[in-house]
Image: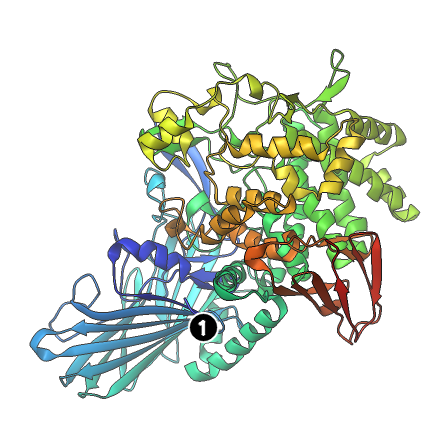
Amino acid sequence: MTGWTWQYEGYDPADERLRESLCTLGNGYFATRGVLAECADDTVHYPGTYAAGVYNRLVSSVGGRQVENEDVVNLPNWLPLRFRRPGGTWLTPDTTPVLDHAVTLHLSSGLMERRTRFGLGADGALLVRQLRFVGMADPHLAGLRTEFTAEGFSGPLEVEAALDGGVTNAGVPRYADLDGRHLTHVVTGTSEQDAVWLRCRTRTSDVRIAYAARLTSPASVTVRHDLPRAVQTTRLDLRDGNTLTVDKVVALHTSRDPAISDPLHAAVDRVHRAAPFDELLAPHLTAWQQLWRRAEPDVPDEVGRILRLHLFHVLQTLSPHTADLDVGVPARGLHGEAYRGHVFWDELFVLPYLNLHFPEVSRALLHYRYRRLERARTAAHDAGRRGAMYPWQSGSDGREETQQLHLNPRSGRWLPDHSHLQHHVGSAIANNVWQYCEAAGDEEFLHTKGAEMLLQISRFWAGSATFDDGLGRYRVKGVMGPDEYHDGYPDADRPGLDDNAYTNVTAAWVLARTLEVLRHLPEPRRRELAERTGLDEAELDHWDHVSRTLHVPFHDGVISQFEGYGDLAELDWRAYRRRYGDIRRLDRILEAEGDTVNRYQASKQADVLMLGYLFSPAELQGVFRRLGLSLDERTWRRTVDYYLHRTSHGSTLSGLVHGWVLARARRRDAWKFCQEALLSDIADIQGGTTGEGIHLGAMAGTLDLVQRGLTGLETRGGALWLDPVPLPELSSYGITVRYHGHWGVRLRLESGSVEITVPLAGRYPIEVHLPGHRAVRVDPGETARLTLLE
């Protein structure tokens, strides 16, 4: 790891899946895993190419049940390029001695480079150098340059390039029992200018997919079609010490593209018009330079290098090209097939960073939710509720995609999955709407689509709450919280928990915030919205009452994760760590023992403590005051300590949230959790899961930890609010943000001071608030240097 490169040296089959995920190249439209071009799908390697929003639905027979799943589709493989001496076997690192091998990810330019020296025995060696890009300037193009150098021999080398339509979804071993054959009607052909093409479609969603490929070689190129492959071959005449180059340029289109008629025509036309490889690189490099200029955090040393890698992978999945698409935030990026490519609540951890750099992308991601608002209303209606009940897992059309069964690899048993009861996803969407509008100053979105989503989510919460005469408060029953370990009470005959604290507090916040938004809507717009949705003052009064009287359980002077949490048994954490070592997936361990985590005070990840991530200390205290409850600093500190000792951190988001909460509370052990979040994917701390796709929320969350968590940055009331956290391990850093039309606002924090620069292009000053009730106005073209109070 250097400042701008990520390099792997040597070849170890056991590390390949992880490397392939972390060397993925993409552009927000599609991405391709960093598999070596000569390697096929096997137990070591997994080629995968995924286009944003391309899903397909299949029915599989699992455990004697018919189970329906929608998956992101592994598209035809455009990478294949293999080589051999005539009459010999194809050379790969798994079949041929490897003398030297290195793969380098060039972050600044979005390029993957590999260098491999294959030993040919008495005939010397063959040096193969490849350079790969997935176009950030033109999101439909990708390219592969291969340089062959003979060392100690001269003679012919056969090279074969292909487009391979014979792929399946097979990247996650846990899904092996599910049908992964998503592609059908594979056809190949040759264009008038000798490019090969491949077209196919998905089996049920009927998305048409087309590739076209051009091969440039110093020797003649021949074509053959071996369905499901379109193959181009060339025979190079190598000379000892000399290098010959073969370039492969590929175009991809699907029927989901904007302004598309025939994807095949578009792909063939684009590859014919594409410039030579070298000329394609120039605009690609410029596009990457512009992205880094807009979004790169200025953080020193190893932390800065890891954050660059995280930002690089966020941009593989969500780039300015995403703004033209109808897609959400896939939890595992476009890097693999884990979670089936579904959209969860991870945008809660992703959008805050995008809001201040690429607000047009955030807006597009919120449009994805708005377009599925009617589906969410249908789901609520079918459940006997009003308003909008967004799904825990979403895919193409917004129906609930959460699996009905999940496999425990430890026991080999398929178990019921009740995570669709995580209705708090609606509150996450509402929070994202509010945070985006505050950061971007987008009143148009807030007054139209945003207000409508907030209204329907609030209507769902108000209708889900039932009044308890004994408590004198409203309760929300039968849900799951962010913890995910607990899906019901011990020995209960139905799933679900009552009064999850995170769910109820965020529901109260949504109701209060929606009332505020509606109150400040322009009167004509408010009247239109009320007329279309049947909203009246009586309903608003009910929302206000619910928002002030939702039940939040406590026990032993701390906030209870849910009603009855304090009555559960304590777990012998030391014994389980001694017995199993890694107990992050404690739920699987206990189930394999014939037990259940539902019986214990044990959480997979932050649940109650998510409140400290979502809200600043002052805002969280304000929500509790509205509920008629007191949350002083001592109670919150006890609550933090209580759950710190009862959490197994079975999610990459857990370390992130704990680091954030502890940093905001000025706790000495914050850095340990921040570091875990930084290393979660590069060290694969979840035990092999990164090879199935990176954890996008954790990567974006670490960027936001520096951007908002450590700076205490809030965007509210038309101003920037700063309350920096003194963290010895990161005492000097800078960020550049886009705020209310100001491009390139620079914040630089040193020990005891902050520097704010507003670029000259802005028309209006920016108001900045600091602790101690201090406020300054920074005019365009000015820099303010301010001392921070102890």
Report the quarter where the N terminus lies.
bottom left
Residue 103, compared with residue 488, is above or below; it is: below
**What is the residue that sits farthest to the front in this orientation?**
790
Which residue is under mark 1?
A: 268
Whole-percent x and y of residue 150?
19, 83
Residue in view at x 79 percent, y 26 percent: 628
Q: Is residue 65 visible?
A: no
Residue in view at x 30 percent, y 69 percent: 102
Between 390 and 657, the one nearer to me in the picture: 657
Q: Is residue 68 left or right of residue 218?
A: right
Between 312 and 170, the one nearer to me in the picture: 312
Whole-percent x and y of residue 480?
57, 28
Q: Is residue 154 left or right of residue 666?
A: left
Whole-percent x and y of residue 11?
25, 63
Whole-percent x and y of residue 75?
41, 57
Q: Is residue 442 visible?
A: yes
Crowding around mark 1 (Cα neighbors within 10 Å: few <14, some 14 to 19, many 20+) is many
Residue 377, compared with residue 263, is above or below; it is: above
Q: Amino acid at mark 1?
A: Val
The colour scheme of the drawn protein is rainbow
Between 543 and 447, the one nearer to me in the picture: 543
Residue 749, compared with residue 505, is above or below; it is: below
> Helix, strand, or loop for circle 1?
helix
Between 201 and 86, the one nearer to me in the picture: 86
**What is the residue that sits farthest to the left in this orientation?**
122
Residue 263, compared with residue 238, is above or below; it is: above
Report which quarter residue 63 is drawn in: top left
**What is the residue that sits farthest to the top in this orientation?**
470
Number of numbered discs visible in the structure rendering: 1
